[in-house]
């Protein structure tokens, strides 16, 4: 039986779900793939825990409960090197300006010949091309489902489901929070502020909803997908961005009057000048496939040369679903 | 560079498209995967052609043009054994009663340690469990996208896109021809006979439309998917079947009156008595995701434990798209 040692960086809501779901699935990995998968190390900014034979539930719970001040002497990458892992799951906070600690973890893992499953977006947004080059050089996988709409298959759709086809265009409703707010505004006629407050009450929106509502989340996803699936060289700054707060109440009323539905749409297109991506607030006709995509639901549409168009709608937007997307990536790695 | 020798059985519309599309993509396989893929043998009931270094376009064209009487002395399996192939693409006629020649080809290929890409359904419907066991024993792949709705991802969705999740239920509009006929009847108020005649004129329906319209095509697809994705032990005879010709004009009018839309739906469910599949003519509400799936468009909906629901709509239904689905399977094999 092949042994797979996992290291997890980031132990917030999603990281904890990754550990919990992994525990549930370990027996199935043994039976189905002959893979003995163990979580041997977990690190966050304040420190890490390691157990060569696999961390116990008790150890993970204790680690999760412990609130510690950030420890400047703790080096996450040194810790990770000492874990002798086969796979890194990076689920820390997304630093989309510099890549942050996640970028250091992912680089370090790839350089050691570890497979990487990225859930956070920072490293991928800032340095995808180099990371992907490192993965190729070391013959390992860099999997990104968790960072690109998670339970809604996006990178899988482009790279696996239509493998071999030329992809002509991609567009999607990639941010559940933004779509939820827009849906409330349109269907119930409430203001953007009211819709945001409701989304926050329901745990759909973060206390600071800027990232999701002002188009950054969608922009990160299209940037990563453009670079991963189209070998693009896009930076986040190359992507024109709109957000749901860019629309006036008057504009909304006019769209409603005209039977149109606003959607925050991320798109990727090949042009003669290279791969281009954008985030736009589009008012779509009732027959448009995105018109019926409501609430926190996400969707992606891909247009190919010989297989026609495919539209995928759905996939839960909660931390368990995000963890499941990361473990789907893991399953692709251990089943190869 | 790794050499991959392909053998193709069946040289009808889809087989020819497989050969043509392969020719277009060979260079990309070299560049992307370091894979030197060559079509070395093609067989049909009347004979075969072989070229160890790869069949030329001229040889394929000549073979395609030649009309020969069936040759009782020609053994397709002997021919296939002599080709020393790495991958078989089986694209012959589907014999859903016995598996026919396709079953013999696939068995023979797997026993020789060849990967198999099945486009025809006969072998899979009649003997999936044994074939899959043979593939496992020899450490090779048995890929079935071409036989299970082709450009619409079905088996990929169940095995790859939601890998690791428990699948609670699957349902789909799996037969483009049946959906086309139903759509014409509902949207234009024409009779079933008129709709069939139009589908035949447009090349959407076969001269004998029984297989598609009476539910057999959908039944084959759900049988194969149930056995492949749920380790079911279903036979075609276990699947209750309805067809689009089972509906009366009166019934149609009543549905229209009630705002309902009839869809030929194939479904798979886990029950306490094991995996069950069915083909039913269902009248769905306007809000049902299949209500807007019109014409030859296909769709699949999957319900999972932790990723929620996914709905996929689309994928062309022509021979090129079917060939592209087979070559997608090939790409999964050579990229591993």
Image (cartoon, coloured by chain):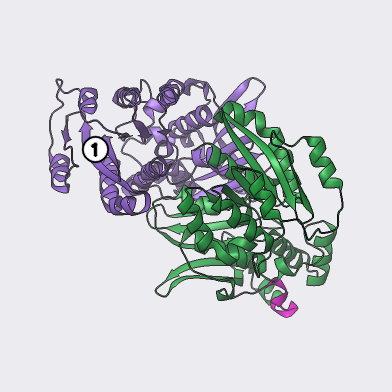
Chain colours: A purple, B green
Task: Return the residue nearer the eye: A105 or A147.
Answer: A105
Chain letter of disc 1? A
Residue A111 in the image: above or below residue A183: above
Label total for image: 1
Task: Return the residue nearer the eye: B290 or A243.
Answer: B290
Q: Is residue A59 visible?
A: yes
Q: Quadrant of the C terminus of chain A?
A: top left
Q: Position of residue B116 (x, y in %)?
A: 58, 50
Disc 1 on helix, strand or loop?
loop
Instruction: Report the residue at 72% width, 38% height from top.
Output: B51
Q: Is residue A215 left or right of residue A117?
A: right
Farthest residue, direction front: B73
Instruction: Report the residue at 47% width, 30% height from top.
Output: A224
Q: Is residue B239 left or right of residue A67?
A: right
Q: Position of residue B272 (x, y in %)?
A: 39, 74
On whether residue B250 falls in the magenta region, the answer is yes
Residue A97 in the image: above or below residue B105: above
Instruction: Report the residue at 79% width, 36% height from top.
Output: B57
Which quadrant holds residue B172? bottom right
Residue range in magenta is: B241-251
Q: Position of residue A37 (x, y in %)?
A: 28, 44
Task: Return the residue nearer the eye: A32 or B73.
Answer: B73
Residue B279 in the image: above or below residue A45: below
Which quadrant holds residue A70? top left
Task: Return the residue nearer the eye: A292 or A165.
Answer: A165
Q: Is residue B143 visible?
A: no
On whether residue B94 falls in the magenta region, the answer is no
Q: Position of residue A279 (x, y in %)?
A: 53, 32
Instruction: Report the residue at 38% width, 26% height from top.
Output: A123
* Residue identifier under label 1: A11
Q: Residues within 10 Å of mark 1 (few under 14, many from 20)?
A: many
């Amino acid at each position: 039986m092949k042994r797979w040692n996992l290291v997890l960086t980031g132990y917030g809501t999603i990281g904890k779900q990754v550990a919990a779901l992994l525990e549930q699935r370990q027996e199935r990995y043994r039976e189905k793939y002959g893979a003995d998968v163990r979580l041997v190390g977990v690190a966050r900014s304040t420190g890490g825990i390691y157990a060569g034979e696999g961390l116990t539930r008790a150890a993970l719970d204790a680690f999760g409960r412990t609130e510690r001040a950030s420890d400047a002497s703790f080096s996450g990458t040194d810790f990770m090197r000492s874990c002798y892992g086969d796979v890194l799951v990076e689920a820390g906070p997304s630093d989309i300006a510099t890549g942050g600690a996640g970028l250091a973890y992912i680089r370090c893992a790839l350089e050691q010949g570890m497979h990487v499953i990225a859930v956070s977006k920072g490293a991928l947004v800032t340095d995808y091309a180099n990371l992907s080059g490192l993965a190729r050089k070391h013959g390992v996988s860099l999997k990104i489902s968790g960072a690109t709409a998670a339970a809604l298959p996006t990178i899988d759709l482009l790279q696996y489901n239509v493998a071999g086809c030329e992809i002509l265009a991609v567009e999607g409703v990639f941010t559940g929070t933004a779509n939820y707010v827009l849906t409330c505004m349109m269907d119930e006629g409430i203001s953007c502020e009211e819709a945001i407050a409701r989304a926050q009450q329901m745990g759909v929106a973060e206390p600071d909803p800027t990232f999701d509502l002002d188009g950054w989340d969608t922009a990160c996803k299209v940037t990563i997908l453009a670079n991963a699936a189209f070998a693009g060289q896009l930076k986040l700054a190359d992507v024109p961005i709109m957000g749901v707060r860019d629309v006036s109440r008057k504009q909304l009323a006019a769209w409603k009057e005209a039977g149109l539905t606003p959607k925050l749409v991320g798109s990727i297109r090949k042009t003669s000048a290279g791969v281009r991506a954008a985030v736009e607030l589009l008012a779509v006709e009732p027959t448009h496939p995105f018109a019926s995509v409501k609430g926190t639901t996400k969707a992606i549409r891909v247009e190919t040369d010989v297989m026609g168009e495919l539209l995928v709608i759905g996939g839960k937007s909660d931390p368990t679903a995000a963890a499941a997307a990361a473990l789907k990536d893991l399953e692709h790695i251990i089943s190869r």
